[in-house]
Image: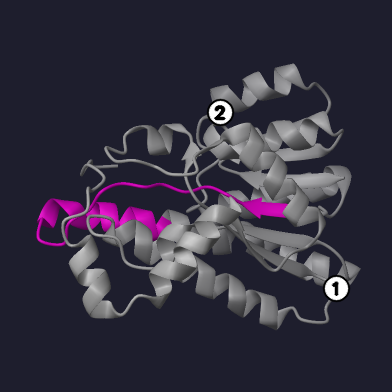
Amino acid sequence: MKVVISGASGGLGLALARHYLECGAIVAAFARRGELLQALAAEFPDQVFCYTLDVRDAPAVQHAANDFAARVGCPDVVIANAGVSVGTLTEYAEDLDAFQQVMDINVLGMVKTFQPFVAAMREAKQGTLVGIASVAGFRGLPGAGAYSASKSAAISYLESLRVELHDSGVKVVTICPGYIRTPMTAINPYPMPFMLEADEAARRMARAIERQIAFTVIPWQMGLTGRMFRLLPRWLYDRLFAHAPRKPRNLI
């Protein structure tokens, strides 16, 4: 199996890379932190192709995709995992750049990760494109306007892509994680129910990818919670969440 993973240098992306490598896959690891990618490659020699890049840089992603395809062929799975999360408030002008970066990485970075592979997958009539969204995209969370908006946009984008590729042989899988123990969640100053370790989350995600489930929430308990939140009338949701704890503001 040949797998491409963005954001593969830490957190969930690293856990996914390790899972597939331990299963014997060839992995193209995309990330900004090249030294961490090299450490992964040293641990799994001859299985990892390292590409130090920013998913916002479309030419860099295209070059990496071309190189990987030339070396090993069209990938079987492309996982757009790279993402950032930061507390934001619209009233602060200094948060505008954070809004921009979160949207660019979490949404357009996903598009730029997939784009170089779609035509080849369509021609081969096989392959799976996997987008890592979030339950935070189900409703707007206070203090997380950028993150919630980006994940909501990712969910809608992935649905559009899935319909566009219907009957092409190329599958699109949307995965919405709940809370996973990573550096991204470590700064959250509030309870995080149903927390999963990154390795366990990666195993569950890999099963969903193998089964080509169009849309899944991991863990399933957060799926039930998310559905309940979506059913709340706006006036009740507003009242319940107006004073909810918020992720700290921090410039990216």
Image location of residue 31, percent across then percent down: 56, 38
Left or right of 180 on screen, residue 1: right
Q: Residue at x 71, y 24 (%)?
A: 41
Residue 149 is situated, as x and y percent measured from the top left of the image, at 36, 66
Q: Is residue 168 above or below residue 62?
A: below
198 with respect to 25 (left or right): left
Say whether residue 103 is magenta: yes
Q: Position of residue 229 (x, y in %)?
A: 39, 68
Q: Residues within 10 Å of mark 2 (few under 14, many from 20)?
A: some
Q: Which residue is mark 1?
A: 169
Question: Viewer-proximal residue, 69 or 79?
Answer: 79
Q: Amino acid at mark 1?
A: Gly
As drawn, the label of residue 34 is 2
Which range is magenta? 78-104
Q: Quadrant of the N terminus?
A: top right
Q: Element type at marker 2?
A: helix
Colour setting? one colour
Q: What amino acid type is highlighted by mark number 2?
A: Gly
Q: Secondary structure at mark 1?
A: loop
Residue 168 colored in magenta in the image: no
Q: Is residue 51 visible?
A: no
